[in-house]
Amino acid sequence: MTGVFNKPNTVLDVNTFNTDQHFSAIGERSVIGTTVQGEDIWEGTAVSIPVPPEAGEQMTIVSSSTADNGATTTGVLTVRIEYLDGSGLEQTEDITVNGTTPVNTVATDIAFVNDFYALTVGSNGVAEGTLYIYKLGSATTIYNLITPGGNKSLVINRKIPTGKDFYITTWTISESKNKETSYRLRATCAPHGASLVEGFLFKRTAKINGNTISETMNPPIKICSGAIVKVSAWATGGGGSGSSSYNGYLQSN
């Protein structure tokens, strides 16, 4: 494929660039504390979302409610995992939930869960309990989850597939408890977007207090193949609450 992304030193305009695939994330965190390293925007208890080993592993899905199972007509019946395998390639697996009885994935090489959502639901249309996807044999190592009353995960992190680069075009952040909070878009990618780094470097930052900010990036922010991107929050006082999202496109590299 040819296009502006393949030309070195070319300024990328959000209105003109070519795309392969839309790519986005949404996340919420009900309680944001004052953790020094920031707190990732998701509903898990860990302040930093765990990352599976690069080679991948088998995982387990379970609900905290018996009403989420393929045999009833109330909660979530089946779910889909969108993941990257040990080679960084995009894959999916569909699983029938069995309530509070754990169900293991068929795949044994899940290296990153990029999304987790309901495929079929009962009469309520949403999860009755919390649906967790976690490391096989370690129920406290939670990689993704769907909370009660929802049918899709609100987990902000994504990993860029092999052979693709991610171009972020917009991001939005919101703080709802009048707690001054610094939100930072960050990724394991160098500032120029061409190579990986070990830590999460800041790509954008905004300090808000009881309001919402949306920004369009022009030119888009490039995140390289294999990088993890997420949003984390630094609050000046405990008890905050907020949400975030970002959107963009994957481009073949």
Image (cartoon, rainbow, N blue to C red):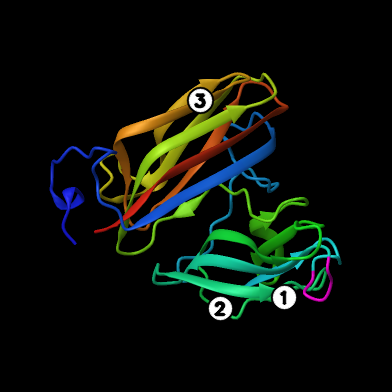
Snapshot quadrant of residue 175: top right
Q: Distance from label 2 to label 1 (Cα)?
A: 12 Å
SS type, badge 3: strand
Q: Any magenta on residue 7? A: no
Q: Are marks 2 and 1 in contact (CB under 8 Å)?
A: no
The residue segment tinted magenta is 69-73
Residue at image mark 2: 107
Foreground label between 1 and 3: 3
Residue 152 screen position, x and y as percent: 64, 55
Most foreground residue, 72 or 251: 72
Task: Answer with left or right where residue 249 lies relative to residue 244.
Answer: left
Quick one: label 1 or label 3, which is nearer the N terminus?
1
Residue at image mark 3: 213
Residue at image mark 1: 103
Q: Amino acid at mark 1?
A: Val
The image shows residue 25, relative to residue 179, as above or below, that is below
